Amino acid sequence: MSTRRAAVLVGTDGSPSADRAIGWAADEAARSGRELRILHVLETPTKTAPGKTAGDTDALVDSWTPVLRGAQDLALRRQPDLKVETMLVHDRDIAAGLRQYAGEATEVVIGHRGRGGFAELLLGSTALHLAGHFPGPVVVVRGRDDGTAGEIVAGVDLVEDPAPALDHAFAAASARGARVRALHAWRPAPLAYEAGVDLERTSDVYRGQLASILVSWRERYPGVEVIEDVVIGHPVEALVLASAKADLVVVGSRGRTLPLGSVSHGAIHHARCPVAVVRSYD
């Protein structure tokens, strides 16, 4: 990875959810020996717009400077030796502002709620606009984030390329001394029971495919314990259930045609721990 991708980037809007994201990102940066960049986006044009004055913009900048300073203090209380940079940028919305600097980051971290407790403010306008579009991991910090479970859950699609998600999951597990639960969930076709389909035999086939996929990651990370888990059920339900005993859920994006699939979308809405949606850098 090039030096351009040397930082963990976290967005803040001054909300309690953003503070949790900053704490999580600070731990992640310290764990990986990287810089932390904390960014707030002023949703105003860089030039004075009709009806606006330069003084209005200056006042906005002044009002958010203490918030960024407080965010930096929070990160340093969490990780005193961390190198932290704060940035205040202008763009049309939060997602666009984060994308300005996403290319220089190993991952982008955001909270799942916005100011005032509106659940969709950040999740709707930022997470869903970034996840699947930014090449690399976008982490939505939600649910339990104390990092004590000792398990990283990787959702494995046996059809789409699982490499981006598995790369991130195994690296995260290795850095934390955690295990990886490679989870594949499948749903029988309608009337499969009535047709006499042997569900256990089908699951065995999927277990074999999953084991074959994981061979290269087992070789690259011999110190990481791996649990191969094939379950019958809806993938989102399976991931949410597994997330209750995980430090992180990692899922892939759907690629160029469908940047964020229904499984990724469901996971970032309902998981009980932070969720990383990973798209290939290619």
Image (cartoon, rainbow, N blue to C red):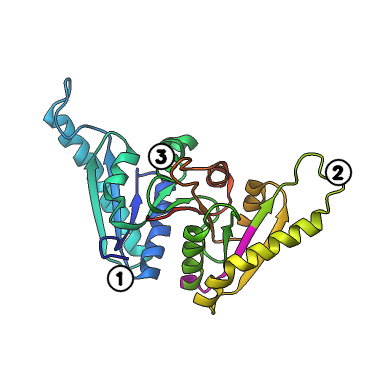
Q: Relative to residue 166, is residue 138 depicted above or below?
A: above
* Residue at image mark 1: 81
Quarter occupied by the C terminus: bottom left
Residue drawn at x 63%, y 59% as measured from the top left: 183
- Is residue 206 in view from this perspective? yes
Mark 1 or mark 3: whose residue is earlier in sequence: 1
- Name which residue type carries label 3: His
Q: Relative to residue 37, is residue 55 depicted above or below?
A: above
Whole-angstrom CA distance, mark 3 to mark 2, is 42 Å
* Residue at image mark 3: 129
Badge 1 density bin: few <14, some 14–19, many ≥20, Cα 10 Å? few
Q: Which residues are magenta?
A: 175-183
Contact check, label 2 and label 1, Cβ < 8 Å: no
Contact check, label 3 and label 2, Cβ < 8 Å: no
| Element carrying mark 2 | loop
| Element carrying mark 1 | loop
Residue 153: image location, x then y, percent = 58, 60
Whole-angstrom CA distance, mark 2 to mark 1, is 62 Å
Badge 3 density bin: few <14, some 14–19, many ≥20, Cα 10 Å? some
Whether the magenta-drawn stretch holds residue 166 is answered as no
Front residue of this view, candidates 203 and 37: 203
Q: Looking at the rendered structure, which numbered label has been put on residue 195?
A: 2
